[in-house]
């Protein structure tokens, strides 16, 4: 009965979340279903297990949600994101429209801009560029997804994406874990995605398809759609409802000024992760007043948080005068972090209750028994949970909460670098999370004015298949050569 309860609770969570119900309600209800079938105490699991795990997630990662959403909103309202996208598309032109959209998305998201901020700024530009180039609108979601939610989210060393931050406290790693393998995976994802999109563009041109009917993409309406919002908040650290709660600057900054905060994010993150924090004597963190933790457990989060904070200071100092209202932009950015972090924390709480069920031992044994070694089973666990929850960050945290200690022990026994575990886990979580019910997919299609029928297969090929190939390459090379 316990296993049946787990499956039933998970099924209810997936079914109703796909139909737009709030995860804040669904996650505890599904957890109580699982606990009830197992004959476990319901209120204790809600207030102690569920809320305890959710609270720990918020305590660990809310600074990154807050600073990431604030930075993204300030970058949008200052005109910096638009300036970077316009410069990239202007340089490459309509003849390389697909590449321009992909690289513009990659540049801003690797620099720390939230996925949804990037989508709402990029899509109007991509619409104009695709129309000028005669490329079908239906290919636009795949191009934007390739640039914003694949390699810059999970593979590029140092990316400040929340998905890349989640494994750090579990494995004691940095944002630059397994850098060589991460760069290789990024090249595979980018190369495969561009090959597929180029192939599809060529086929459309041969068929004389053109951009297609319809005007500009309905970005404004999509941002205010409550169904889109409920699905989106578990997929990214930015609440789409806050997109229009402040005004964008009338004039965009010069490209060098616009790109400066992105450079600061990468540079500060790199210096702190590899040079400054490793040299600090932080034994005092083991004292009870600091939670009896260690520098290895918090250094990764500290480096990303400090990098985003430094970039915000530079952005306000260099372009703050362009903002119509700094307070309105800051409030919108801060508010945009709240619902996403609570939604993902609720998924984590659900996972904690499931992991506390006696029947979960059978699930754990099945996952660890998958052939191919720890790297393969870790990739399978994060893939499956991200697919079921529709959230890379939620699925990744659930998997690591339940299994990280086991994988660290296996890694120590088999000589596997924790950095390799980190990179495999993140890339794994960023593959099957792009199923049809994923909030980022739903939001992207709505903003682009496309449907699952027209565009989803190209999203699968550019965002899922390419990522799976890259994941396989990282596992094979990591198993043969170790982490590099």
Image (cartoon, rainbow, N blue to C red):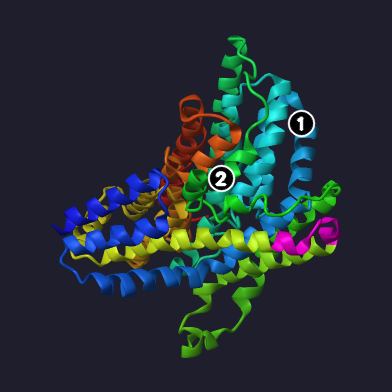
Image quadrant in which the N terminus is located: bottom left
Which residue is located at x 64 percent, y 48 percent?
A: 117
Total marks shown come to: 2
- Which of these two is toward me, 183 or 122? 122
Percent of width and height locating residue 390: 42, 47
* Vertical side of 429 occupied by 62: above or below: below
Label 1, secondary structure: give it: helix
Percent of width and height locating residue 159: 60, 55
Residue 146: tell me if it is visible: no
Percent of width and height locating residue 360: 22, 60
Residue at numbered disc 1: 92
Determine the image quadrant of residue 210: top right
Which residue is located at x 60 percent, y 17 percent?
A: 202
* Vertical side of 363 occupied by 52: above or below: below
Within 10 angstroms of label 1, few (less than 14), some, or many (20 or more) residues?
some
Residue at numbered disc 2: 151
- Which of these two is toward me, 133 or 349? 349
């Amino acid at each position: 009965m316990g296993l049946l309860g787990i499956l039933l609770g998970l099924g209810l969570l997936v079914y109703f979340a796909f139909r737009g119900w709030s995860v804040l309600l669904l996650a505890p209800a599904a957890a109580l279903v699982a606990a009830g079938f197992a004959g476990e105490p319901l209120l204790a699991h809600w207030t102690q297990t569920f809320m305890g795990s959710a609270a720990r997630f918020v305590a660990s990662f809310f600074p990154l949600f807050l600073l990431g959403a604030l930075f993204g909103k300030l970058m949008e309202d200052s005109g910096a994101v638009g300036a970077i996208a316009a410069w990239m598309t202007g340089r490459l032109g309509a003849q390389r429209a697909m590449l321009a959209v992909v690289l513009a998305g990659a540049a801003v998201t690797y620099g720390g801009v939230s996925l949804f901020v990037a989508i709402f700024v990029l899509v109007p530009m991509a619409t104009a560029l695709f129309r000028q180039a005669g490329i079908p609108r239906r290919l636009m979601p795949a191009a934007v997804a390739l640039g914003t939610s694949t390699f810059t989210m999970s593979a590029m060393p140092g990316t400040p994406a929340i998905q890349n931050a989640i494994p750090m406290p579990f494995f004691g790693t940095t944002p630059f874990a397994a850098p060589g393998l991460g760069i290789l995976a990024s090249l595979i994802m980018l190369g495969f995605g561009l090959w597929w999109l180029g192939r599809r563009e060529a086929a459309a041109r041969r068929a004389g398809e053109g951009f297609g009917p319809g005007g500009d993409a309905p970005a404004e309406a999509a941002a205010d759609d409550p169904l889109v919002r409920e699905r989106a908040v578990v997929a990214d650290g930015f609440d789409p409802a806050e997109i229009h709660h402040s005004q964008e600057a009338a004039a965009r900054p010069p490209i060098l000024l616009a790109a400066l905060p992105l450079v600061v994010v990468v540079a500060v993150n790199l210096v702190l992760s590899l040079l400054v924090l490793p040299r600090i004597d932080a034994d005092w963190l083991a004292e009870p007043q600091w939670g009896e933790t260690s520098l290895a457990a918090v250094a990764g989060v500290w480096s990303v948080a400090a990098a985003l904070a430094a970039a915000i200071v530079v952005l306000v100092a260099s372009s703050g005068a362009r903002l119509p209202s700094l307070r309105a932009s800051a409030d919108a950015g801060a508010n945009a972090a709240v619902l996403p972090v609570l939604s993902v924390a609720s998924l984590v709480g659900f996972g904690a209750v499931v992991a506390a069920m006696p029947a979960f031992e059978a699930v754990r044994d099945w996952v660890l028994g998958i052939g191919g070694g720890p790297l393969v089973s870790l990739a399978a666990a994060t893939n499956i949970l991200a697919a079921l929850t529709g959230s890379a960050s939620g699925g990744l945290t659930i998997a690591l909460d339940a299994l990280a200690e086991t994988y660290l022990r296996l890694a120590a026994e088999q000589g596997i670098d924790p950095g390799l575990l980190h990179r495999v886990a993140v890339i794994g979580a960023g593959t099957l999370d792009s199923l049809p019910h994923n909030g980022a997919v739903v939001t992207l299609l709505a903003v682009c004015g496309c449907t699952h029928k027209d565009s989803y297969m190209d999203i699968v090929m550019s965002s899922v298949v390419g990522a799976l190939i890259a994941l396989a390459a990282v596992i094979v090379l990591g198993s043969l050569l170790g982490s590099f």
